[in-house]
Image (cartoon, rainbow, N blue to C red):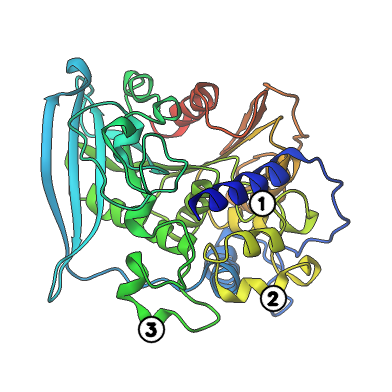
């Protein structure tokens, strides 16, 4: 069974991420035209009228309805050291609980802060794929006991082992980030909801059955994004962290969640999407790579039931991902693509940012007003927006991180 699952996963990955496809003809909904037909010409009209319309529409038709903020979150600091990473960092591990009749262990948050930087520090927050222990070989990181996919490094029968430590440390250049004066925080997405379809009965979904069996059900991408906001709740209590300077970042499906978290939660000061593709930064109506049918059929738990009505029917979609990105305005947003990752539709990712730029213009920014799709390894950073397409394949690399750090230096320092 496990072998068949892995073969199916790999075949789907190869199909989606290796084939170049011709973009379909499409028409995009007008960002600056309200549902009643009136034009939006000021930032006040955007914030008070059009933004709420788009937020409601995307929630109902794609990401699903999320729970309210729990009234009684508990933050338990179960590990702290100021000699982490050979004395270069402060390490904190925080368990976040939802209080109730029985405390629910929501997630474990791993943080590294630069030891000698002036506090409070700005920080990057992102979900990880295989457990906090996989982002660094630090033996003090709590080893996750949650389900992991069978391809996870060092795992046996869908569970991590000591050999799993540092399995994806190449995607988390923690020391480089710390040297630039930023903190790093991460959470295992599987703490919130394991990445497989079980009719929304496990993970955080089990606590909110009333948000299932409906068209706008609480989805997995929605759960991951909701969990990122609970981390923000913690940051607001930690005097070592500048909660006004948090960049939420995500790679691949975690990039989809990061975009939605940043769109919904305006406390995030910056949003970074790395090769998030369909359902992330790429325009759905182009039908390149991860089109809606592929997303919903391959991963039916990622989005709400209502999103399935647009399988092979992107023309009927009353919004597109440029509208999700517009919800982030005027906060800075950066999108990274890779030349060898056609399944994520690099041009479609860029166009989403460009077509969202008129909203940034309402706030006095000139972001991407006259910018064309750039050449490979020629990043563009302009007045609140950033984009690059690099050589290489579907991954997040040190090159990507260097661009994100440069961008952060412009807005978070």
Indicate the quadrant containing the C terminus: top left, top right, bottom left or bottom right: top left
Q: Are marks 2 and 1 in contact (CB under 8 Å)?
A: no
Which one is closest to the eye, mark 2 or mark 1? 2
Q: Is residue 278 left or right of residue 213?
A: right
Q: Is residue 183 visible to the viewer in this orientation of the structure?
A: no
Q: Are marks 1 and 3 in contact (CB under 8 Å)?
A: no
- Which residue position is annotated with label 2? 309
The local secondary structure at tag 1 comes to: helix
Name the one closer to the observer, 381 or 405: 405
Crowd rating for badge 1 (residues with CA inside 10 Å; few <14, some 14–19, many 20+): many
- Which residue position is annotated with label 1? 356
Could you tell me which residue is drawn at 33 percent across and 18 percent down? 179
The relative height of residue 394 versus residue 253 in the rendered view (above or below) is above
Q: Is residue 374 left or right of residue 183?
A: right
Give x and y (percent) for residue 141: 21, 35
Q: Is residue 92 visible to the viewer in this orientation of the structure?
A: yes
Q: Earlier in the sequence, mark 3 or mark 2?
A: 3
């Amino acid at each position: 069974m496990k072998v068949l699952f892995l073969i199916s996963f790999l075949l789907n990955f190869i199909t989606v991420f290796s084939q170049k496809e011709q973009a379909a003809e499409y028409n995009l909904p007008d960002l600056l035209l309200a549902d009643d037909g009136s034009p939006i010409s000021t930032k006040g009209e955007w914030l008070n009228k059009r933004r709420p319309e788009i937020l409601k529409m995307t929630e109902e038709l794609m990401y699903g309805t999320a729970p309210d903020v729990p009234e009684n979150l508990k933050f338990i600091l179960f590990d702290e050291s100021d000699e982490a990473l050979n004395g270069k960092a402060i390490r904190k591990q925080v368990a976040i609980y939802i209080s109730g009749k029985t405390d629910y262990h929501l997630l474990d948050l791993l943080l590294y802060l630069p030891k000698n930087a002036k506090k409070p520090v700005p920080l990057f927050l992102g979900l990880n794929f295989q457990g906090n222990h996989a982002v660094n070989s630090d033996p003090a990181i709590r080893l996750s006991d949650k389900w992991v996919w069978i391809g996870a490094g060092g795992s046996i029968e869908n569970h991590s082992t000591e050999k799993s430590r540092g399995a994806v440390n190449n995607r988390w250049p923690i020391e480089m980030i710390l040297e630039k004066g930023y903190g790093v925080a991460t959470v295992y997405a599987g703490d919130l909801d394991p990445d497989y379809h079980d009719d929304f009965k496990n993970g955080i979904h089990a606590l909110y059955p009333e948000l299932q069996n409906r068209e706008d059900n609480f989805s997995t991408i929605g759960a991951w994004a909701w969990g990122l906001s609970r981390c923000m709740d913690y940051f607001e209590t930690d005097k070592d962290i500048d909660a006004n300077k948090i960049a939420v970042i995500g790679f691949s499906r975690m990039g989809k969640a990061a975009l939605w978290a940043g769109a919904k939660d305006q406390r995030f000061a910056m949003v970074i999407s790395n090769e998030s593709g369909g359902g992330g930064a790429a325009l759905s109506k182009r039908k390149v790579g991860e089109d809606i049918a592929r997303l919903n059929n391959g991963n039916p738990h990622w989005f709400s039931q209502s999103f399935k009505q647009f399988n092979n029917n992107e023309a009927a979609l009353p919004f597109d991902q440029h509208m999700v990105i517009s919800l982030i305005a005027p906060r800075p947003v950066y999108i990274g693509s890779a030349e060898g990752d056609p399944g994520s539709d690099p041009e479609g990712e860029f166009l989403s940012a460009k077509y969202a730029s008129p909203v940034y213009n309402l706030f006095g920014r000139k972001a991407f007003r006259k910018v064309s799709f750039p050449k490979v390894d020629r990043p563009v950073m302009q007045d609140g927006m950033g984009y690059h397409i690099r050589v290489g394949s579907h991954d997040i690399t040190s090159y990507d991180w260097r661009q994100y750090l440069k961008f952060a230096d412009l807005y978070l320092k």
